[in-house]
Amino acid sequence: MDIILNVTVSIAITLLMAAGLYIVYGLMNVINMAHGELLTIGAYTVVILTASGAPFWVGVVAGAAAAGVAGLCVEALVIRRLYSVGGLSTLLATWGVAIVIQQLLRIVFGPSAQFVSAPVNGTSNVLGTSYSTYRLLFLGAAILVLAALTVAFTRTSWGLTIRATMDGADKAEAVGINSRRVYMATFIVGSAVAGLTGALIAPLASVTPLMGTQYVVQAFLVVMVGGVGSLYAPLAGAVLIGGLSSLMTTFLDATTAQVIVLAAVVVAIYFRPNGLVGTADLR
């Protein structure tokens, strides 16, 4: 049972990490290499607020808000100027943004790791197995966030407007939709989800200026393996990347487990170049 819980939580962490990136890349076709740094901003926000005595969950909300504001600045100052350029321009630009954010965080907080205490301690009994209460809480929070995003994109007029714009900005403009505002709102939401993820992950990992790098790689692999164009695509990618990684590290050393996961990614992309359940061309 312990293995099942570990795999499930790993899938939830991986899926939540990839959700913000999927919103930006899958819907906007913007390759945001600063996604990991937005996640880091959320984590450091929790570090600051909990150190000053604020409740952990206030830090989580503030982390999402801080990353959302940072995303607004990135979109307005960098991304907005590159929509018409396309190609790899957003990748290169946001890569530069990521380096700048990393160095700013390093200057402000230093290179040493920071740690956040979980809002709840101890373990809970799950079908006879003692398991970390905060990990179970994280799992519940991840499910709620992902469910809210799914409802927002599929059951609201806002989600319909976004999907209409992504299907064709020119057509959307013709019926009165302001595509620039839609792009801005979508990027802010994707950034806020990244910050929320970083805030929730903070008690599970050490917080450093470079922590986002490892997470952004996994997030991109999830999007590439799962594909785009389907709400189930990130889940498929997270099951393969997060689930397989957790399962392999249970029985094998970290290096061997990583090699196996990467081999699985290569095989998946070779046989399903559009993703496991994706409908759009990723090439």
Image: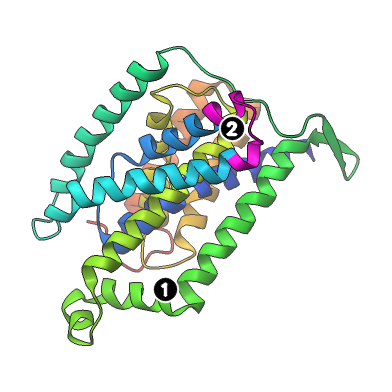
Q: Nearer the viewer, residue 6 or 24?
A: 24
Which residue lies at the image location 44% right of the left edge and 29% below the top edge? 259
Q: Within the magenta stretch, is there residue 160?
A: no
Task: For residue 195, say whether it is visible.
Answer: yes
Q: Give the image location of residue 220, x and y in percent.
A: 36, 44
Helix, strand or loop status at disc 2: helix
Relative to 117, 60 lies left or right: left
Relative to 25, does residue 94 appear above or below in the rendering? Answer: above
Which residue lies at the image location 55% right of the left edge and 33% below the top edge? 46
Residue range in magenta is 47-58
Q: Nearer the viewer, residue 97 or 280?
A: 97
Q: Nearer the viewer, residue 56 or 241?
A: 56
Relative to 161, 5 lies left or right: right
| Of labels 2 and 1, the one closer to you | 1
Helix, strand or loop status at disc 1: helix
Which residue lies at the image location 59% right of the left edge and 23% below the top edge? 51
Residue linked to disc 1: 159
Residue linked to disc 2: 248
Q: Which residue type does callout 1 highlight?
A: Gly
Relative to 230, 48 lies left or right: right
Disc 2 + disc 1, Cβ < 8 Å = no
- Considering every residue shown, the one lying at the far left of the view is 85
Q: Give the image location of residue 134, x and y in percent.
A: 72, 37
Q: Distance from label 2 to label 1 (Cα)?
A: 37 Å
In the picture, the disc for residue 117 is: none
Q: Which residue type does callout 2 highlight?
A: Met
Q: Quadrant of the N terminus?
A: top right
Q: Earlier in the sequence, mark 2 or mark 1?
A: 1
The local crowd at label 2, few if under 14, some if 14 to 19, many if 20 or more residues have their Cα within 10 Å, is: some
Relative to 281, does residue 97 appear above or below in the rendering? Answer: above
The total number of labels drawn is 2
